[in-house]
Amino acid sequence: MSMAERLGKGGSEMERRCKEFSDWVNNNQLIELGFSGLEFTWCRGLSQATFKAARLDRALVNDEWRLCFPEGVVCNLTKLTSDHCPLLINTNGFAPIPTALKPFSGGFDENSFP
């Protein structure tokens, strides 16, 4: 939806495509659910010189869906075999994970370079 959701080269063609998609979302009165978890849902490249990442996958809903599921949330999960991350959508929200159950919670940034 914006160039801020990308790592790597862009250019004017990519800016145009981002604007067109953002306009399409707005024109269709869709609501983005947001997310927790990984910032980028797609990536490729094995070195810093070739690495590219973007937030390509997202959950979009209409007003009716949002009214039916006001607690609906999205979590971007870690990719396994695809170059896209799976999205986990829960209509009832997610319970917070107690800090005591997060043994590696100190200093690790899951949005860091691969």
Image: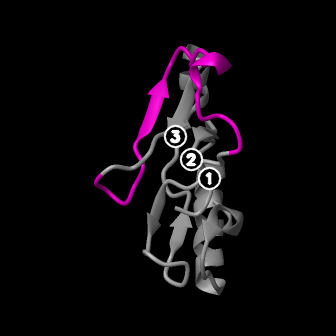
- Crowding at label 3, few (<14), some or many (≥20) Cα neighbours within 10 Å? some
Which region shows up in magenta?
81-107
In the displayed structure, 54 sits above or below 84; it is below
Is disc 1 in contact with disc 2, using a CB cutoff of under 8 Å?
yes
Res 98 seen here: no
Q: Determine which residue is flagged by label 1.
A: 111
Q: In the rendered structure, does residue 83 fall within the stretch colored magenta?
A: yes
Classify residue 102 as left or right of residue 44.
right
Task: Kindly identify the amino acid type of the residue bearing the numbered disc 1.
Answer: Asn
Residue 97 screen position, x and y as percent: 60, 19
Nearer the observer, 109 or 79: 109
Nearer the observer, 88 or 62: 88
In the displayed structure, 21 sits above or below 44; it is above
Residue 96 screen position, x and y as percent: 63, 18
Q: In the rendered structure, does residue 38 fall within the stretch colored magenta?
A: no
Task: Kindly identify the amino acid type of the residue bearing the numbered disc 3.
Answer: Ala
